């Protein structure tokens, strides 16, 4: 079983790798190099061969950047990784600075870099981020230089090979719509907008469009490649030849040409003088500059696959519901273990990760976890995106809260669930805060809303009970989730920041309000739910949509103060618990103790 808490890195990384990188920089005629976390595919997770930031610094977090100069090195991280970066990065070699999205460009602009030449790799930066870097360097007095080869790749001795896992077809019973139908639907949009072709660079979009999956990266069943979709519905798929089988060729059919990924440059050149749809948020600056050299007319627009991919069809919704039924058994076993099997003073956060992943593996159908498990006890739970490591590993003690955020990848779908439980007796304050979070969670479950409503419009609903008490949380309330794809998916989102994508039937989103007290504990409650079809309510002015939860797990009974719940909220909770019990208890026949516990955990209030 794969361990999620292993900590790579340490002082030896920077001490051995920085000199190699600086030698290469000098040979390339640059005084510095900007190194983002992102790779060529802009994925949340990367193959080992593309983990360049980790190679240079030892840092393994999912967001960050480094700025390497001949006499100085800086690593930039956000607040999620304030502890992890101290564990993994040598502070004698690197200055550690905090940045906010989209990058540390304001910090770079304030540096004195007069006359220095700073290199960057246009293959791993979008046009927007590359432009922001160039402007920052200009303000700092430096000259930006796009490099044809990444100096990390040239310095990395023993660099792992790019993954060559074979592509696999996504069964039509899970996909619901054939690849040919999907391609024609997107092609019709290209024709309507006057585009001759679209360059598709996001691996999740490629996976969905061609009904294929892969295992090139951890936590997401993605095939790494590129595609060009033409306005007649034909397409070119650029992947490593070793990934392609006869089954895949038959699956894709005659309208899809499979080409070597190394031919992408030529494929873009073949679009000469054509109008090409390209997404500046997902395609690299290299793609844009290559198209410009080919004298193509670039139509900058959002990935045309993203919105159809986010709007699940009936087969994808059914698959997601089935995935949550499968996942409900290990979750029930885990929650039962938390109440009956842990040893305060001995059991640790890492023990909990092992136990939960073991229960999921016991299903026999788990393909992978869907993200690195957040196993956070006490004050660690106050860091909303904490990741346990050997150095931070906390031991459970009585009288505090444990927050666990986890998920699984199954052929049927992708899961993501957060539950917070009390270890020992909770305080009155913990109960109050948990119940306020639950009220927001229930409000987001019960809401009905008309066409045109975005996640931004709804975000305050989940926060209102906390706001009324002068409280809040600093993360979004909900993100999109893929259909056996990435656990974080757009373009829809429920958050304070403006999101222009209206919620639509079939979209799967998380519902995860929380509350965190630094140095004490964190609370988050998360279900996945999908947007329902339009319905006419009695005497309604217009049709409305709602949410239907697909996560199946009880809440923490001893953290709920029912006196703070309205009758409508209490009814919703009881109805949900009945659904959980009716669905999950019959699946626990091999675990009678867990079944009995579930009956009690789901008893009506």
Image (cartoon, rainbow, N blue to C red):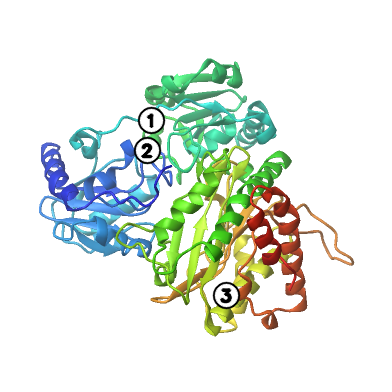
N-terminal of the two: label 2 or label 1? 2
N-terminal of the two: label 3 or label 1? 1
Residue 272 visible at all: no
Residue identifier under label 2: 47
Q: Residue at x 75, y 70 (%)?
A: 604
Q: Quadrant of the C terminus?
A: bottom right
Residue 393 visible at all: yes
| Residues marked 3 and 1 touching at CB (< 8 Å) | no
Q: Quadrant of the N terminus?
A: top left
| Residues marked 2 and 1 touching at CB (< 8 Å) | yes
Residue identifier under label 1: 163
Q: Quadrant of residue 250?
A: top right
For mark 1, give the secondary structure: loop
Which numbered circle lies on residue 524?
none
Crowding at dot 2, Cα within 10 Å, few <14 / some 14-19 / many 20+, comes out as some
Residue identifier under label 3: 434
- In the rendered view, does 282 fall on the left or right side of 541? left
For mark 2, give the secondary structure: loop
- In the rendered view, does 533 fall on the left or right side of 153? right
N-terminal of the two: label 3 or label 2? 2
């Amino acid at each position: 079983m794969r361990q999620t808490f292993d900590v790579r890195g340490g002082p030896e990384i920077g001490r051995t790798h920085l000199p190699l990188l600086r030698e290469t920089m000098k040979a390339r005629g640059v005084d510095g190099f900007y190194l983002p976390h992102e790779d060529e595919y802009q994925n949340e997770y990367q193959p080992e061969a593309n983990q360049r930031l980790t190679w240079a610094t030892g840092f393994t977090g999912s967001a960050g950047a480094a700025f390497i100069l001949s006499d100085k090195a800086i690593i930039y991280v956000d607040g999620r990784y304030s502890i992890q970066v101290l564990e993994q990065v040598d502070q004698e070699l690197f200055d550690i600075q905090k940045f906010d999205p989209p990058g540390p460009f304001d910090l770079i602009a304030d540096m004195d870099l007069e006359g220095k030449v700073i290199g960057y790799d246009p293959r791993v930066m979008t046009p927007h981020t590359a432009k922001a870097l160039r402007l920052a360097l200009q303000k700092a007095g430096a000259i930006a230089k796009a490099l044809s080869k990444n100096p990390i790749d040239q310095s990395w001795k023993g660099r792992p090979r790019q993954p060559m896992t074979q592509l696999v077809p996504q069964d039509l019973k899970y996909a619901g719509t054939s690849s040919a139908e999907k391609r024609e639907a997107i092609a019709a949009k290209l024709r309507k907008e006057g585009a001759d072709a679209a360059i598709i660079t996001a691996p999740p979009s490629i996976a969905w469009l061609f009904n294929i999956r892969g295992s090139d990266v951890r936590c997401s069943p993605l095939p790494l490649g590129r595609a060009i979709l033409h306005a007649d519905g034909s397409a070119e798929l650029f992947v490593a030849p070793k990934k392609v089988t006869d089954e895949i060729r038959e699956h894709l059919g005659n309208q899809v040409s499979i080409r070597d990924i190394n031919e992408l440059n030529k494929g873009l050149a073949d679009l000469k003088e054509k109008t090409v749809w390209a997404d500046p948020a997902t395609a690299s600056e290299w793609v844009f500059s290559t198209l410009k050299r080919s004298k193509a007319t670039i139509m900058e627009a959002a990935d045309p696959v993203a919105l159809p991919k986010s709007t699940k069809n009936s087969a994808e919704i059914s698959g997601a519901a089935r995935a949550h039924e499968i996942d409900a058994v290990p979750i029930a076993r885990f929650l039962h273990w938390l109440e009956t099997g842990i040893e305060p003073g001995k059991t640790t956060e890492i023990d909990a990760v092992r136990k939960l992943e073991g229960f999921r593996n016991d299903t026999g159908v788990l393909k992978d976890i869907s993200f690195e498990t957040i196993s956070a006890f006490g004050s660690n739970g106050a860091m909303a995106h904490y990741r346990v490591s050997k150095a931070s590993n906390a031991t459970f003690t009585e009288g505090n809260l444990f927050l666990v955020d986890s998920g699984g990848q199954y052929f049927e779908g992708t899961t993501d669930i957060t539950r917070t439980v009390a270890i020992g007796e909770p305080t009155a304050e913990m109960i109050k805060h948990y119940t306020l979070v639950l009220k927001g969670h229930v409000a987001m479950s019960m809401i009905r809303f008309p066409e045109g409503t975005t996640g931004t419009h709804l975000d305050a609903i989940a926060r209102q009970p906390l706001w009324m008490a002068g409280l809040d949380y600093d993360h979004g309330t909900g993100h999109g989730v893929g259909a056996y794809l990435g656990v974080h998916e757009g373009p829809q989102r429920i958050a304070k920041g403006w999101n222009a994508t209206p919620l639509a039937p079939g979209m799967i989103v998380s519902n995860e309000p929380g509350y965190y007290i630094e140095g004490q504990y964190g609370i988050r409650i998360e279900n996945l739910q999908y947007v329902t079809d339009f319905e006419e309510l009695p005497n309604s002015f217009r049709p409305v949509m709602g949410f239907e939860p697909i996560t199946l797990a009880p809440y923490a009974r001893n953290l709920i103060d029912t006196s703070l719940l309205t009758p409508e909220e209490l009814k919703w909770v009881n109805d949900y618990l009945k659904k959980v019990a009716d669905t999950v208890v019959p699946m626990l026949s091999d675990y009678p103790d867990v079944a009995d516990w579930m009956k009690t955990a789901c008893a009506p209030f």
